[in-house]
């Protein structure tokens, strides 16, 4: 009921609205005297309603903000979240990639250190002589090589690798091969059977 009066839909509200329209068309002095008369008449009548300023409608609040402000605030927060989502995802993926690359770099540095140690070892003349004796069975000038063959110590010859039996292709592979590859023209066309004339 209060909202209807505030909006001007009740009979009393229509009267105020009519008078306010009429007041616009008349001079300001006449409008002021009429408003004074009306307020004095309302004072005289005990049950009559005084013309008061419009009643304020209480707005609902969310987190201390009015509903409209809360909606705008939520939209701004969503826009910020969406704006920051892609850069954050990129940042986190780049950090993961940087950590992975750092680990790979450390592995490569360990391999490099191992290879440098091996290069230094291979430049040592004593290591070269020992490898020549063990791998190539070379001897120094003036030495006599002896090869001792003890049965069972030698490694047995490697067994031949088992041959895989090729499984036939499925029927649809054969069909596709027949369709996709043209027949050679070298094959003679079958001649019709000759029968009695």
Image (cartoon, grey):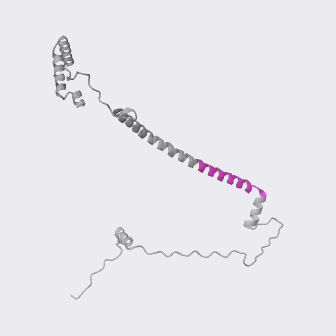
Inspect the magenta stretch and tell me whether residue 105 lies in it.
yes
Which residue is found at the position 19% from the left and 17% from the top?
44
Q: Furthest residue to the bottom?
A: 196
In the image, residue 140 above or below residue 36 = below
Q: Quadrant of residue 196?
A: bottom left
Residue 121 percent coordinates (x, y): 74, 56
> What residue is shown at x 41% (from left), y 37% (from top)?
77
Point out residue 193 in the picture as x, y percentages from the top left corner: 27, 84
Q: Horizontally, is 186 left or right of 45 in the view?
A: right
Q: Nearer the viewer, residue 57 or 2?
A: 2
For the point 51% across and 44% down, the residue is 92
Prevailing secondary structure class for the magenta stretch in the rendered image: helix
| Location of residue 37 (image quadrant) | top left
Quick check: 95 above or below 141? Answer: above
Between residue 134 and residue 104, name the one nearer to us.
104
Is residue 181 left or right of 42 when viewed as pictured? right
Residue 169: within the magenta?
no
State the quadrant of the N terminus: top left
Q: Nearer the viewer, residue 197 or 31?
A: 31
Q: Residue at x 16, y 23 (%)?
A: 15
Q: Residue furthest front?
A: 46
Instruction: Tell me: 144 left or right of 1.
Output: right
Q: In the figure, residue 19 lies in which quadrant? A: top left
**Coordinates of residue 151 in the picture (x, y in percent):** 74, 79
The image shows residue 137 at horizontal and vertical percentages of 75, 68
Front residue of 66/112: it is 66
Bounds of the magenta span?
102-125
Viewport quadrant of the C terminus: bottom left
């Amino acid at each position: 009921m209060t909202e209807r009066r505030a909006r001007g839909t009740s009979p009393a509200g229509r009267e105020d609205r009519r008078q306010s329209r009429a007041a616009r068309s008349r001079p300001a002095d006449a409008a002021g005297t009429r408003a004074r008369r009306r307020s004095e008449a309302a004072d005289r009548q005990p049950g009559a309603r005084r013309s008061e300023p419009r009643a304020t409608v209480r707005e609902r609040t969310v987190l201390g903000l009015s509903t409209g402000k809360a909606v705008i605030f939520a939209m701004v927060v969503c826009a910020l979240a969406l704006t920051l989502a892609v850069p954050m995802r990129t940042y986190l993926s780049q950090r993961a990639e940087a950590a992975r690359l750092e680990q790979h770099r450390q592995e490569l540095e360990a391999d490099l250190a191992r290879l440098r140690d091996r290069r230094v070892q291979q430049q040592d003349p004593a290591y070269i002589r020992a490898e020549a004796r063990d791998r190539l069975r070379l001897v120094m000038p003036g030495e006599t090589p002896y090869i001792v063959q003890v049965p069972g110590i030698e490694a047995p010859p490697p067994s031949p690798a088992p041959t895989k039996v090729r499984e036939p292709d499925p029927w649809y592979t054969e069909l596709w091969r027949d369709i996709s590859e043209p027949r050679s023209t070298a094959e003679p066309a079958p001649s019709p059977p000759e029968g009695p004339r």
